[in-house]
Image (spheres, helix red, strand yellow):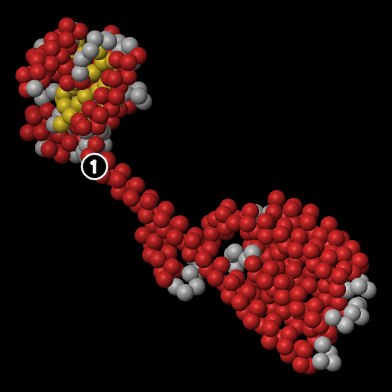
Amino acid sequence: MPAIKQRQAIERALAHPLSPIDPTLRDAFHQYQLQHYGRLLLLVNLLAQLAYLSYGFADAVVLQDLGWTSLQVRLLVIGTMLPVVLALFRWCRDVRVLDLALPLQILAAAVVWYALLSQSNEPSIPHYLYASLIFIVLANLCVQVAFLPSLLVSLAISAVTLYAASQVNHQDSRGLLVFTLVYLPVLFFSLFMSLSTTLDRRRAFLRTVLQELTQQALSEANQRLHDLAHTDPLTGLGNRRHFEELSQRELAQAARYGQPLCVLMLDADHFKRINDGHGHDVGDEVLRRLASTLRAELREGDVLARFGGEEFAVLLPNTALAEAEQVAERLRAAVVRQCITLASGAQVRFTISIGAAPFEGTPCDLGALLKAADTALYRAKAEGRDCVRVASQASVLEHAAASAAASAAVG
């Protein structure tokens, strides 16, 4: 589902009284519940086992004729169910199953307890039966995911409880009525608690997804703005701003670790002639072809950018001047081999001139390197084009000194 439609669907779900989960999000919803509430479900299950055991001691006091039997039965049930519960929470990844583990255990525990009560002759049993209210409360206490299964199990527990009450109070309709009137509000409030919890969990998940979608949309928008500010739309290369930002970092690292670094300035030869003779569409295609050719020939860590017009710049980190001159020659030769065939069948070939300037550890700024490389580029233009010319370290230092003097004058 597209992000915009998904956002709209989530907003509609949050506005709905039941906050329904879209089918496309159900797996993610179940994973979210397992991740955030799996430990809570396990904790409630373990506490319920302790509560079940504690009622065994109450049985021992109230049911004097079956107290010890009740305690033994409860210990047997806990000894059987506890390993099952621990294994279930260890290996089961379906939170819907874990969500129903405790309600189903309580249903079984209620059946066992009422069976014990039916065997006792203690006169206080009709009053002791009120302790069964804990069953319906615990059954709905840990429900996190789905209300309908909880409702069905709660109705089953209620049916067993009310049946047991009718058997215990079979000669006392008034006692049965009082028990029922007490039991039903507890049932309704526990179901309301279960419904509220499941709705809260749904809304928490939906808000989380909505927040993630909003953050993703904001991140994508920021990235698009960044790309617009740092990318040349025609060639897809970085622009001058992008080049200068990356180059400043590389230059600082080269100065810190004493590494060599070189800058190349490239210019398409006779580009105005291509534009005037074949049109700007062909000129644009020349620039795109030139950009793709340069990119293919450079290393992954090299920085390539379009400075504007037909001018490009390359930063070669950890590269000495002799190696940079070889790279420049390789770029020049690769461009010479390029040919654009027009619809008319005519072929357009083009060349580049390149100027190179080195950084060899002597303090200087990026502007001085670029000016030195640009000076070497103009020398290549003046000496016939389609060639590489190299600026000396002295030329770089001269431009650095001129830049420093200009800065001091402005200051």
Quadrant that contains the N terminus: bottom left
Q: Which residue is mark 1?
A: 228
For residue 124, which quarter of the picture?
A: bottom right
Q: Position of residue 7 (x, y in %)?
A: 39, 61
For residue 71, which quarter of the picture?
A: bottom right
Q: Is residue 74 left or right of residue 291?
A: right
Q: Position of residue 161 (x, y in %)?
A: 76, 79
Q: Report how many numbered discs are placed on residues in the image.
A: 1
Q: Position of residue 95 (x, y in %)?
A: 63, 59
* Outermost front residue: 61
Write the residue at 83% across / 76% down. 114
Write the residue at 30% across / 12% down. 260
Q: Is residue 389 above or below residue 344?
A: above
Q: Is residue 59 left or right of residue 139?
A: right
Amino acid type, callout 1: Leu
296, 249: nearer the viewer: 249
* Mark 1, other Cα within 10 Å: few <14 / some 14–19 / many ≥20: few
Write the residue at 14% across / 18% down. 371
316, 396: nearer the viewer: 396
Q: Is residue 283 visible?
A: yes
Q: Position of residue 29 (x, y in %)?
A: 54, 59
Quadrant that contains the C terminus: top left
Q: Is residue 349 visible?
A: no
Write the residue at 20% across / 8% down. 393
For residue 93, which quarter of the picture?
A: bottom right
> Which element is circle 1 on?
helix
349, 281: nearer the viewer: 281
